Amino acid sequence: MKNGNKILLILRHAKSSWKEPDLQDYDRPLNKRGKRDAPRMGKLLKELDLVPDLIISSTAKRAKDTAKAVVESSKYKGRIELNHSLYGADFDAYLIALRLVPDDFNKVLMIGHNPALEELVRVLTGKMEHMSTCALAEVELKITSWGSIGNKIEGQLINTWRPRELEADKQ
């Protein structure tokens, strides 16, 4: 991180199952592909030295399950902050949650849902990025305090990774 800038990692939850039609959307678990992809993204974070200082996740089952898999495979040692307001929300809810992050956390991973995550990337970087399930975006923010994050372009999209684009040997 240059000049004390903050790094925001944005991860869409892994692929969820539709096998049980009676389940509420909020309670849908990961499907087979989701259970494979979430640990792959955690391993990627570890390989790229992007393991976060803090993870903030939606409370939906598929997001929490994604967070748990990422924690395990990345060897993340911190806590997962569960935030119910991220489920079914627009990008503003994500900005509000970020503004509450203590400034001693320099690298934050947010796990949530579309279309809010795609809009969050666009608002912060000016770039339209397709966030397929379990896609991970790295955004460098030109801020020194999370409390100052706003609804304007303040960051640079460094990279985006999607599970299907990762090499087979990284599984």
Image (cartoon, rainbow, N blue to C red):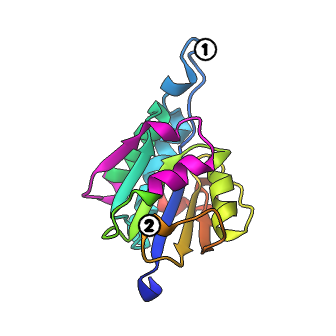
Residue type, mark 1 in image: Pro
Name the quadrant of the N terminus: bottom left
Residue shown at 43% from the left, 77% from the top: 144
Q: Position of residue 126 (x, y in %)?
A: 72, 69
Instruction: Judge by depth and name the residue closer to the eye, 95 or 23.
Output: 95
Above or below for 3 versus 52 = below
Q: Nearer the viewer, mark 2 or mark 1?
A: 2
Residue shown at 63% from the left, 57% from the top: 120
Mark 2 crowdedness (10 Å alpha carbons): few <14, some 14-19, many ≥20: many
Question: Which sits earlier in the primary sequence, circle 2 or circle 1?
Answer: 1
Q: Position of residue 153 (x, y in %)?
A: 66, 71
Is 32 colored magenta in this rendering? Answer: no
| One can see residue 95 in this view | yes
Q: Position of residue 43 (x, y in %)?
A: 41, 60
Query: What residue is disc 2 on?
Result: 146
Is 87 colored magenta in this rendering? Answer: yes
Residue type, mark 2 in image: Trp
Mark 1 crowdedness (10 Å alpha carbons): few <14, some 14-19, many ≥20: few
Check the image and name the residue furthest to the bottom.
3
Residue shown at 61% from the left, 46% from the top: 133
Q: Position of residue 65 (x, y in %)?
A: 41, 38
Check the image and name the residue furthest to the right.
128
Q: Residue 57 sits in which quadrant?
A: top left
> Marks 2/1: CA distance?
40 Å
Instruction: Judge by depth and name the residue closer to the eye, 129 or 133.
Output: 129
Instruction: Judge by depth and name the residue closer to the eye, 169 or 150.
Output: 150
| One can see residue 68 in this view | no
Q: Secondary structure at mark 2?
A: helix
Q: What's the magenta region?
A: 72-98
Q: Residue 16 sits in which quadrant?
A: top right
Query: What residue is disc 1 on?
Result: 21
